[in-house]
Image: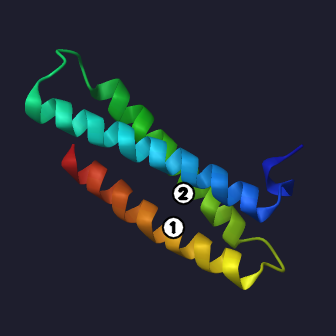
Amino acid sequence: MKWSDLPEPILLQRSFLFGITGIVLGALSLLNAQLQVLQAPMGPINGVSLLLQFFGLGMAVMVLKKRKLAQEHKEKSQIMILIMVVALLFFIFSL
């Protein structure tokens, strides 16, 4: 089954999970860079964080592009896109 065939609530839920996981990983990486708790390279964690955020953003856009979309799903998708773009830009500029 393709991801584009799934219902909108499931896609929005997965988009949120991917996005929040990416944001948490990015925040942990930034905190570790400032506090030096763990002496390990943060490059791979930053990469995974950005990848998860892009994936969540792509799923939210995929929901928005569906035809005959309910107004509540459209609004949720637009808000999620806005929040993920802001978070993604923050983590890109913080590198």
Q: Residue at x 85, y 46 (%)?
A: 2
Q: Is residue 80 above or below residue 18?
A: below
Labels 1 and 2: the sequence-earlier one: 2
Instruction: Tell which residue pokes out farthest to the left in this image.
Output: 35
| Residue 73 coordinates in the image, percent (x, y) | 69, 74
Residue at numbered disc 1:
81
Extreme-right residue of the structure: 1
Position of the N terminus, as image quadrant, is top right
Taking the spot 50% from the left edge, 42% from the top edge, the residue there is 52
Identify the residue at horizontal 24%, vertical 19% (top origin): 41
Badge 1: residue crowd in 10 Å (few <14, some 14–19, many ≥20): many
Disc 2 packing (10 Å; few <14; some 14–19; many ≥20): many
Q: Which disc is residue 30 wearing?
A: none
Give how far across and how far down residue 39 sits, in percent. Answer: 17, 15
Q: Nearer the viewer, residue 88 or 27?
A: 27
Q: Position of residue 13 (x, y in %)?
A: 65, 55
Q: Amino acid at mark 2?
A: Leu
Task: Choose top left, top right, bottom left or bottom right for residue 45.
Answer: top left
Which of the numbered marks, if any, corresponds to residue 57?
2
- Disc 1 to disc 2: CB gap under 8 Å: yes
Q: How is the image coloured?
A: rainbow
| Disc 1 residue type (three-letter) | Ile
Q: Secondary structure at mark 1?
A: helix
Q: Taking 92 as reference, is 37 above or below it?
A: above
